[in-house]
Image (tube, rainbow, N blue to C red):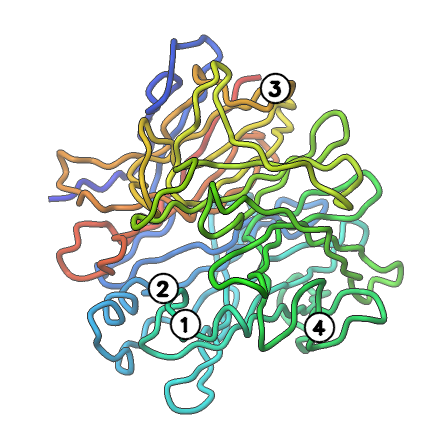
């Protein structure tokens, strides 16, 4: 029987992580509560984006999808998903800083095209204009074929991805008609809509994170593209947005790209995360992939690059290490880096292992750790577990704690992370052993 954590449960403090060293008095503390409880084991709730949507009021919104892992189950077992009808994706809003929530609209996640083809609409990012409060809704579409997973040869996902924008001037009640995102410049059009990207050949996407604001008022979003020259290889960059003075839209640009050498990653560098360093440089992490069927020089790495010229050029990607020189071993999984307003320090959230692995697993433990901003190395004594597999409760060995979303609470300045456990590549079924509920993790950082 799985135990459901209801109410406040103190999980972990510094020193419990997989690669942690001595404990410290400056502890990071994590408290877990149920964020969105689901009545059905077969229809998990996953928050794809969450954050503030007002410059001067503590109004939060989040985008939620339901039942995606059940559809994954049908696909990996060679069954049709035609009769799989989960709830429509949901937007929720909180006007009291997350204490209570109300339903605030839906969107169509999949639109039929013809036959087994459909248009997939991903969870939107919501970004407000800090001067006017106008909300930008940014989302990605791609063409999919029922029964073919996005990363399998023959899937059209990596060559059909497009970004779209909508605007709301009434707090998200109504939205403008969608417009395709096309970068500024005479060379760009709806087909060649960003540097090195052509619809029908490759595509680009953004991560579901809050924007990083620059001193000049522009904002950054982590951005990655599938490379034209090689299947399953990616490069990372920043999407730069500038709100127009008339508040009628946003002008877009993309920085230069960085990627990871083939000796260290089969797939290049993708799923980037961005933070600003005190000296003005931008710090970008990238996911790397270690295949199981051939050897590469450095396995299980996380890599980072920096830029001192606002993305015109990037430094040569370096392997993320601990301050004592050891490699930070990670599966191919999501990483977030951010500067905390509470103390100005640089933090990383990812799955950290005590030994090398291959591919995307295990993701059975998720940690947070501080990065020394002088050496850009992870401080092992700060590694703190956010969530880990509960063996006693019967959680399966292949459970994944990844693909979370987060924001910084304006009142407490704590980090709020929301995450739903994933049953991995077996998909969701009646006895998969992974609760369908979305959990809220409040991470208290030291002053």
Where residue 27 appears, as percent x and y from the top left, is 45, 16
**Tag 2 residue:** 66
Corner quadrant of residue 274:
top right
Local secondary structure at mark 1: loop
Of 381 and 237, nearer the camera is 237
Of circles 3 and 2, the one toward us is 3
- Residue at the disc numbered 3: 375
Tell me the CA gap for discs 3 and 4: 39 Å
Q: Which mark is residue 187?
A: none
Label 4 element class: loop
Q: Is residue 264 above or below residue 347?
A: below
Which mark is first along the chain, 1 or 3?
Answer: 1
Residue 299 place in picture, x, y as percent: 39, 37
Disc 2 is placed on an element classified as strand
Disc 4 from disc 2: Cα separation: 33 Å
Q: Which residue is mark 1?
A: 88
Tell me the number on the disc at residue 192: 4
Of the pair 149 and 43, the residue shown nearer to us: 149
Residue 132 is situated, as x and y percent measured from the top left of the image, at 80, 55
């Amino acid at each position: 029987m799985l135990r459901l954590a209801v109410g406040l449960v103190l999980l972990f403090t510094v020193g419990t992580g997989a690669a942690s060293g001595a404990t410290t008095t400056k502890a990071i503390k994590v408290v877990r509560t149920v964020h969105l409880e689901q009545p059905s084991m077969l229809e998990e709730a996953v928050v794809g984006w969450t954050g503030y949507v007002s410059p001067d009021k503590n109004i939060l919104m989040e985008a939620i999808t339901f039942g995606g892992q059940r559809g994954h189950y049908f696909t990996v077992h060679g069954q049709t998903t035609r009769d799989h009808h989960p709830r429509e994706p949901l937007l929720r809003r909180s006007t009291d800083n997350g204490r209570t929530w109300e339903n605030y609209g839906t969107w169509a996640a999949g639109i039929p095209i013809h036959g087994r083809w459909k248009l997939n609409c991903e969870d939107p990012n919501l970004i407000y204009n800090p001067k006017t409060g106008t909300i930008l809704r940014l989302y990605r579409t791609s063409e999919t074929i029922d029964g073919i997973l996005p990363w399998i040869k023959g899937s059209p996902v990596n060559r059909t991805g497009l970004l779209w924008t909508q605007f709301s001037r009434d707090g998200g009640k109504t939205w403008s008609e969608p417009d395709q995102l096309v970068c500024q410049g005479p060379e760009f059009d709806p087909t060649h809509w960003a540097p090195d990207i052509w619809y029908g050949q490759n595509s680009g996407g953004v991560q579901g994170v809050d924007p990083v604001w620059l001193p000049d008022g522009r904002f950054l979003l982590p951005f990655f593209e599938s490379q034209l020259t090689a299947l399953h290889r990616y490069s990372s960059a920043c999407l730069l947005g500038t709100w127009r003075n008339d508040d009628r839209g946003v002008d877009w640009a993309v920085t230069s790209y960085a990627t990871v050498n083939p000796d260290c990653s089969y797939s290049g560098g993708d799923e980037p995360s961005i933070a600003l360093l005190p000296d003005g440089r931008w710090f970008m992490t990238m996911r790397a992939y270690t295949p199981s069927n051939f050897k590469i020089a450095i396995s299980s790495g996380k890599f980072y690059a920096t830029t001192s010229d606002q993305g015109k050029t990037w430094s040569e990607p370096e392997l993320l290490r601990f301050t004592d020189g050891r490699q930070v071993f990670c599966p191919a999984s999501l990483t977030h880096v951010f500067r905390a307003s509470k103390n100005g320090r640089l933090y990383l959230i990812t799955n950290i292992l005590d030994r090398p692995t291959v591919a995307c697993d295990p993701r059975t433990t998720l940690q947070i750790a501080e990065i020394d901003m002088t050496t850009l190395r992870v401080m092992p004594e700060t590694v703190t577990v956010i969530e880990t597999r509960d063996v006693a409760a019967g959680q399966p060995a292949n459970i994944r704690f990844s693909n979370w979303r987060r924001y910084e609470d304006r009142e407490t300045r704590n980090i709020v992370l929301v995450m739903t456990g994933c049953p991995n590549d077996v998909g969701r079924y009646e006895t998969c052993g992974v609760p369908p509920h979305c959990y809220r993790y409040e991470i208290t950082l030291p002053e």
